[in-house]
Amino acid sequence: MRAGDKVFFLKVFDVVQAAVSEANCSPDGSEDAEDAAHCAVGDPVKTVEALANRYVLNDTERAGVLRHVITAGDLSGYGLVNALTHCSHELDDHDRATEFEVLGGKMIELPDAEWKGLAQAP
C-alpha cells in the first residue's frame, strides 16, 4: 500500500509541477506564479514559522517543510511550495497529505503582497 501511495503522490506532484510550469509561461499575463518564483525567502526558519502559523502546521510538519527548504537550497517562493509538496510525501495521513498538495497550489496563487509577507517574515 505504501508503494501505491507513494506513486499516487508522485503523480500529484507531477501534476502540480506541470500546472505551476504552465502558469509561469501563461500567455494570459498571470503574474502570481512568476512573483512566487522570484520572491526571495529572507530567513527560511522565520518564513516556515509564518507559513506554519498561517496554515496551522504542527511541529513535525513544520520541521519537515524546513528540512526540505534547506536541503533543496531553493530560497524562493517555488522552493517553499516545493518543500511543502515534498513534505506531503512523508505524511501518513492521506487526507493531510492531500491538504498539503492543495495548499501548495493555493500558495502559487497568493497575491504578491502576501508572498512578501511570508517570505520576509520578521
Image: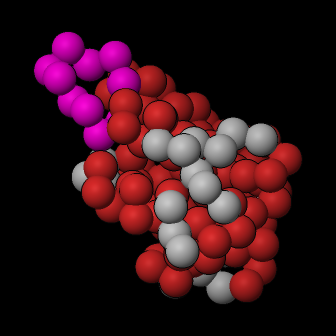
Residue 109 visible in the shown view: yes
**Magenta stretch encompasses residue 28:** yes
Q: Quadrant of the N terminus?
A: bottom right
User: x and y percent of residue 92 in the render?
Assistant: 74, 71
**Magenta stretch encompasses residue 13:** no
Query: Height in image: 32 above or below 83?
Result: above
In the image: residue 101, left or right of residue 111:
right
The mark total stands at 0
* Residue at left offset 29%, top offset 49%: 112
Front-most of 62 and 49?
49
* Residue at left offset 26%, top offset 32%: 31
Residue 16 visible in the shown view: no
Front-most of 69 and 2?
69
Q: Quadrant of the C terminus?
A: bottom right
Principal SS element in the magenta part? loop
* Residue at left offset 29%, top offset 57%: 113
Q: Quadrant of residue 40?
A: top right
In the image: residue 8, left or right of residue 53:
right
Query: Height in image: 83 above or below 19?
Result: below
Please state the extent of the stretch shown in magenta in the rendering: 24-33
* Residue at left offset 45%, top offset 79%: 54
In the image: residue 103, left or right of residue 50:
left
User: x and y percent of residue 55 in the render?
Assistant: 47, 77
User: x and y percent of residue 102 in the render?
Assistant: 43, 57
Query: Height in image: 121 above or below 77?
Result: below
